[in-house]
Image (cartoon, grey):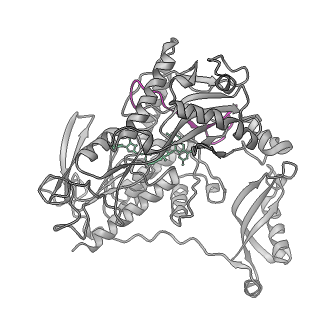
């Protein structure tokens, strides 16, 4: 098989009813200088849109071709053609001999033989992929998730959007599937990590559309993600793992530098249970503020890290399509257009768009009562009237007062509460969001409704001055950036575009520090060997093995998005399995 890249292919080749394979075959044959009928099979491996010249929008494709004549293939490779490297599945060791608990046992229940069974906390992408890896390694992990199963969670989110009554354990941040379940399901990542291929394959096995394997910017959409999340859970159980919903990790017990117990609170029975736990993967996401505080108080080393805050900006999708694709905007082979913009201000602040949702809607992503948080999602079809995107300003730990590792959390919370108050003042419904047009914001002219953009935020918006809830330096940076961003995407700073506040949870405000083996380190002064005083990785006991706590994913500060969180979950699970395999 030969891989041919950089093939220019007309949009029409992918119109409904067109024979895309024939067009790809012809383009590959031209590039290889062979007759099209020498190609016995063709497969699309990557496709992106080249819209740099609006009068010449086309696809750029990579294909894999099979030739009937092996000798011809060898000659082409000898002449410089690239031989295709077939996908090799992620190697997973068989450690089933190490998991001692019989299936009906709760893992690690004192007195049982289940101590080797690992615990995974959080069923977001990081936790789901970690648990699936461990299950496939024969380790029969227990996955605990504070929120409900995804089907119940969908109902909880719909009820919140209708009533404004927030369930703090079942919302857009918490519940099976994690933060990205109500999202655009973009599966893009900036990293060229070899694990991304495995994550995409595992997603397809779980029912995601196969096209995510060849799209340059794949996305699944919230409507399809729900089924994918359920299938991942079923795969974990089928491979020997167990999943408990509405079960929150409440505390961890360390002794002699090593993890010994975990206390789990079961919301259904309203009871806590302490279980043996020697190896715990913690994938709690960026909104588990109580869990961060518990870890800090247990002596785990947490650090402040930079993150971003800002607003969601909405435009008509037709305007974005026209700005990106020119006259080709309505072409049936092109979906709703995307954009990604950034500027660096003289003040040193970066302002950028993030998590753009074509044809999507703005959602309320709050997980605490009394605080408004917005984010965005799209369905698979991306066929809504508006495009939305986060418009964010970078913030740095030096922007927060004090020296607490969780100062960034307090910074977020203060802005979220200000937004709640700001929208509430004007008779807004519970969890209405403050909104302002770009024109009013730039003119410092209070809040009047947009004439062209109907906000999609389900709880309703209250038109007001966003400066009342944003920190001054954030509002100033957005105001300075808007005209600069408009130069990159015409119409971005259109006076009628709508900004809805506040977007504070784009990434984690903390990092849970870990070592090269993915295991947590401990705060200065918390390295004592005394039982119960926190992990001790410097001396004695489990020096070689580490302390047994594996922080991963976005909440731990090692990922930013579905793909990178899933990749980090896989890598943490791999590290845990390797450590277990080496332990006598
Ligand atoms: P999370 O997904 O946050 O999962 C953590 C899980 O842990 C949660 O389910 C939580 O309930 C659970 N948990 C927390 N504490 C405990 C505890 N103590 N005990 C038990 N369980 C606990 N990223 C993209 O790449 N593409 C997108 O299109 C995209 N859109 C998004 C849209 C929205 C509305 C949101 C909110 C986020 C979006 N993101 C998107 C970001 C993406 O969702 C996150 O980067 C990703 O989900 C992080 O994965 P994670 O597994 O690290 O954490």
Residue 8 drawn in magenta: no
Viewer-nearest residue: 372 or 273: 372
The location of residue 415, given as percent across then percent down, is 46, 29
- Asked where in the image residue 485 lies, by quadrant, the reply is top right
The location of residue 110, given as percent across then percent down, is 13, 53
Residue 39 vertical position relative to residue 380 in the rendered view, above or below: below
Q: Residue at x 44, y 71 (%)?
A: 91
Q: Is residue 177 visible?
A: no
- Asked where in the image residue 175 lies, by quadrant, the reply is top left
Viewer-nearest residue: 363 or 219: 363
Q: Quadrant of the N terminus?
A: bottom right
Most frequent secondary structure within the magenta stretch:
loop
The location of residue 304, given as percent across then percent down, is 39, 47
Q: Residue at x 60, y 73 (%)?
A: 86
The location of residue 208, given as percent across then percent down, is 56, 51
The range drawn in magenta is: 367-389
Q: Is residue 144 left or right of residue 83?
A: left
Q: Quadrant of the C terminus?
A: bottom left
Q: Is residue 562 left or right of residue 255?
A: right
Q: Residue at x 44, y 58 (%)?
A: 568
Residue 386 drawn in magenta: yes
Q: Is residue 152 left or right of residue 422?
A: left
Q: Quadrant of ligand 1?
A: top left
């Amino acid at each position: 098989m030969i891989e041919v890249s950089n093939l220019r292919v007309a949009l029409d080749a992918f119109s409904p009813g067109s024979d895309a394979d024939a067009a790809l075959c012809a383009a590959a044959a031209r590039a290889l200088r062979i007759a099209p009928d020498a190609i016995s099979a063709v497969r699309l491996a990557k496709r992106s849109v080249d819209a740099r010249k609006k009068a010449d929008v086309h696809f750029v494709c990579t294909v894999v071709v099979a030739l009937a004549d092996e000798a011809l293939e060898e000659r082409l490779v000898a002449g410089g053609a690239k031989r295709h490297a077939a996908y090799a599945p992620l190697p997973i060791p068989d450690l089933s001999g190490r998991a001692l608990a019989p299936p009906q046992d709760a893992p690690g229940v004192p007195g049982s033989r289940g101590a080797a069974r690992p615990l995974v906390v959080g069923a977001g992408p990081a936790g789901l992929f970690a648990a699936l890896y461990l299950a496939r390694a024969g380790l029969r992990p227990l996955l605990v998730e504070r929120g409900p199963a995804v089907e119940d969670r969908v109902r909880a989110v719909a009820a919140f959007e209708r009533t404004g009554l927030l369930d703090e354990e079942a919302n857009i941040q918490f519940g099976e599937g994690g933060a990205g379940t109500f999202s655009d399901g973009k599966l893009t990542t900036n990293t060229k990590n070899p694990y991304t291929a495995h994550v995409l394959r595992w997603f397809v096995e779980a029912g995601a559309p196969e096209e995510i394997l060849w799209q340059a910017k794949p996305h699944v959409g919230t409507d399809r993600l729900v089924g994918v999340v359920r299938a991942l859970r079923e795969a974990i159980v089928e491979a020997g793992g167990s999943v408990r919903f509405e079960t929150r990790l409440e505390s961890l017990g360390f002794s002699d530098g090593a993890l010994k117990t975990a206390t789990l609170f079961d919301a259904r029975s309203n009871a806590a249970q302490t279980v043996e736990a020697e190896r715990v993967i913690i994938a709690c996401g960026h909104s588990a503020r109580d869990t961060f505080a518990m870890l800090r108080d247990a002596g785990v080393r947490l650090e402040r890290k930079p993150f971003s805050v800002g607003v969601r900006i909405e435009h008509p999708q037709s305007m974005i399509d026209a700005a990106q694709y020119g006259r080709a905007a309505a072409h049936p082979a092109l979906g709703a257009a995307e954009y990604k913009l950034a500027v660096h201000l003289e003040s040193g602040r970066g302002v950028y768009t993030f998590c753009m949702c074509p044809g999507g809607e703005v959602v309320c992503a709050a997980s605490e009562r009394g605080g408004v948080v917005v984010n965005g999602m799209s369905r698979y079809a991306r066929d809504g009237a508006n495009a939305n995107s986060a418009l964010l300003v970078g913030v740095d730990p030096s922007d927060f007062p004090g020296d607490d590792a969780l100062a960034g959390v307090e910074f977020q919370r203060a802005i979220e509460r200000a937004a709640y108050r700001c929208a509430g003042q004007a008779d807004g419904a519970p969890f209405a969001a403050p909104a302002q047009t770009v024109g009013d914001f730039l003119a410092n002219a209070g809040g009047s409704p947009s004439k062209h953009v109907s906000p999609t935020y389900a709880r309703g918006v209250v038109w007001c001055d966003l400066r009342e809830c944003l920190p001054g330096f954030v509002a100033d940076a957005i105001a300075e950036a808007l005209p600069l961003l408009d130069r990159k995407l015409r119409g971005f700073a259109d006076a009628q575009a709508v900004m809805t506040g506040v977007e504070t949870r784009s990434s984690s405000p903390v990092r849970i520090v870990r070592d090269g083996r993915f295991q947590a380190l401990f705060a200065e002064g918390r390295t004592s060997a005394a039982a119960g005083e926190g992990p001790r990785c410097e001396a004695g006991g489990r020096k070689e093995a580490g302390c047994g706590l594996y922080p991963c994913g976005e909440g731990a500060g090692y990922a930013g998005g579905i793909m990178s969180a899933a990749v980090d979950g896989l890598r943490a699970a791999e590290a845990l399995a390797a450590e277990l395999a080496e332990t006598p």
